[in-house]
Amino acid sequence: MTVSNKQGFTLVELLVVIGILGILSAALFPAISNAVMQANMTAVGNRGRDIYVAITGANTEREPLGLGNVWPKTELPQGATQGGSGQQDIGDMTFQNSCDYFWELNDGDNLGTEEHSPYVAGFDFGKLAGAGVPAHSGSGQLQENNNMWTIAGNVRDEMEDIVPILITRNLPGTGLYSDIPTEPTNERITLGENYEAPFSNKGAVLVRKGGGMFKVRSKYATPLIIYNRQSFRTSVSGSQNAKLTYLSPNGVEDPQGG
């Protein structure tokens, strides 16, 4: 007669296996976490690029019509007039935060109706959400809780392409610059002080005036790296143009310089 020997794992062997799995998990966690964050930053950056493309496309369409650009303004330029329709045009409006601006850009007052007529194509409120920032419900005014973007105000065509024009809200606009006459400083910008999401103090995403997307970890969030060691000026001596500023979801953040 054959006797079957079915001996299972001992408690010690199980503990050893669990311990090995724990060590492997601890070793792999940083790599997994980094990969997830990189994927989220790329997804957020692509949304920012979509906003950039929508706005620049609208500006190209409006130029031969004699209409001003749709970048947000905190002050009206000299000689600004209403659009040809007789109704107030976004190019003749001023804004003090990015929520009001994006609401007007997407004609939020008429959202879901036959009268809905946004200023840009390829933009919706879903471009403002992601990486822990919930999407707008579709009803009611756009709130800062549903908007992850700070956007540059008073942007002009002649400004340098290196200037960030869209930044995730966890990077304060006060840490950026309107003018850098010499090489930028290497002092780190503190992330996540005003907003936990997206990315908290771990990193941020920017879209430059030239259209390039830039993902930056907190360790490298310095003007030296953000501006790629370039000096530039957005202000013009004696000009009546409003200075470059940044509109966060809840207010204006003035950059340094100027």
Image (cartoon, grey):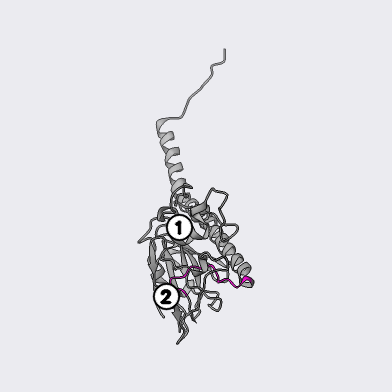
Q: Quadrant of the N terminus?
A: top right
Q: Is residue 85 visible?
A: yes
Relative depth, front residue between 167 and 55? 55
The question of residue 216 being in magenta is answered with: no
The residue tagged 2 is 186
- Specify whether residue 222 is in view: no
What residue would you read off at disc 1?
Answer: 148
Residue 159 in the image: x percent, y percent?
53, 77
Circle 2 — which element? loop
Residue 106, image x and y in percent? 53, 57
Q: Does 194 sit above or below residue 13?
A: below
Task: Assign a secondary structure to mark 1.
Answer: loop
| Residue at (46, 42) in percent of width and height | 21
Q: Nearer the viewer, residue 85 or 90?
A: 85
Within 10 angstroms of label 1, few (less than 14), some, or many (20 or more) residues?
many
Q: Earlier in the sequence, mark 1 or mark 2?
A: 1
Residue at image x 57%, y 49%?
Answer: 114
- The answer for how far apart the CA atoms under marks 1 and 2 are is 26 Å
Range of the magenta residues? Answer: 65-76
- Which image quarter is the C terminus in? bottom left
- Inspect the image, locate mark 1, and give the three-letter code of the amino acid beneath it: Met
Q: Identify the image quadrant of residue 211.
A: bottom right
Q: Main secondary structure of the magenta part?
A: loop
Q: Position of residue 212 (x, y in %)?
A: 57, 67
